[in-house]
């Protein structure tokens, strides 16, 4: 008698996300697309509204990160990466009287750290992760936007909304694509 146990060994078949896992990816990816779209469609909102939307976007993206790796052997890594975004999002949303500069730096640091971690995981574990290219692409988008935000923290609400709205929208689309088009999604 043998039990079927998934393995992260090279050559082993990749772990399939459960149906619930794919649904969670799709729902959270769609939420990221919606929040990114709101930021792009309404970039002239007040700084406080922007802080709440950015905080919500980072929290949704952080939970999306956690959901992506929940059914895998990388649960700990994806939980840490997701926690970086969730903490940044909560700080952005609930920091009383947050300034635009503080919001930009907080968001830029969160995206940069998350993106670096995401790219590192994708490259280091590419033999075990089906769809590792999607991981690397999502991380690279976060690194680029994080660097842009950090190099220009005094940007206007309009510019910050457009940059971060585009980042969140693209990240959500990448995850949705991976959830539905990658037969054995291991992102």
Image (cartoon, helix red, strand yellow):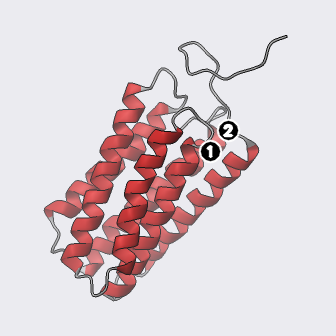
Residue closest to the far front: 1
Q: Is residue 92 in sight in this rendering?
A: yes
Task: Pick whichever, 156 or 153, lies toward us.
Answer: 153
How many marks do you count on the picture?
2
Where is residue 28 shown, x and y percent of the image? 59, 59
* Residue 29 shown left or right of residue 96 in the figure: right
* Sequence-wise first label, 1 or 2: 2
* Residue 68 shown left or right of residue 15 in the figure: left
Callouts 1 and 2 close, C-beta under 8 Å? yes
Q: Which mark is residue 179?
A: 1
- Distance from label 1 to label 2 (Cα)? 9 Å
Say what secondary structure mark 2 lies in.
loop
Q: Work out which quarter of the rendered image holds the N terminus and state it.
A: top right
Question: Which residue position is annotated with label 2?
Answer: 17
Q: Residue at the location (27% across, 51% down)? A: 144
Say what secondary structure mark 1 lies in.
helix
Q: Is residue 173 in sight in this rendering?
A: no
Above or below 170: residue 126: above
Q: Residue at the location (67% across, 33% down)? A: 183
Residue 57 position by quadrant = bottom left
* Residue 12 shown left or right of residue 81 in the figure: right
Q: Residue at the location (80% across, 13% down)? A: 2
Task: Pick whichever, 121 or 146, lies toward us.
Answer: 121
* Residue 64 shown left or right of residue 168 in the figure: right
Where is residue 88 shown, x and y percent of the image? 35, 64
Above or below 96: residue 14: above
Q: Residues within 10 Å of mark 1 (few under 14, many from 20)?
A: many
Q: Residue at the location (37% across, 28% down)? A: 123
């Amino acid at each position: 008698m043998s039990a079927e146990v998934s393995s992260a060994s090279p050559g082993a078949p990749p772990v399939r996300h459960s149906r619930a896992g794919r649904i969670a990816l799709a729902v959270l990816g769609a939420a990221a697309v919606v929040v990114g779209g709101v930021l792009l469609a309404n970039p002239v909102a007040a700084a406080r509204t922007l802080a709440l939307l950015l905080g919500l976007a980072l929290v949704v993206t952080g939970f999306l990160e956690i959901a992506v790796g929940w059914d895998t052997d990388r649960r700990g890594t994806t939980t840490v990466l997701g926690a970086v975004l969730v903490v940044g999002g909560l700080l952005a949303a609930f920091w009383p009287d947050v300034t635009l500069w503080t919001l930009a730096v907080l968001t830029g640091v969160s995206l940069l750290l998350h993106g670096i971690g995401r790219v590192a995981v994708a490259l280091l574990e590419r033999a075990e992760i089906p769809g590792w290219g999607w991981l690397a692409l999502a991380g690279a988008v976060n690194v680029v936007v994080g660097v842009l935000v950090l190099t220009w923290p005094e940007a206007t609400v309009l510019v910050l909304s457009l940059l971060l709205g585009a980042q969140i929208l693209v990240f959500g689309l990448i995850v949705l694509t991976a959830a539905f088009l990658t037969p054995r999604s291991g992102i």
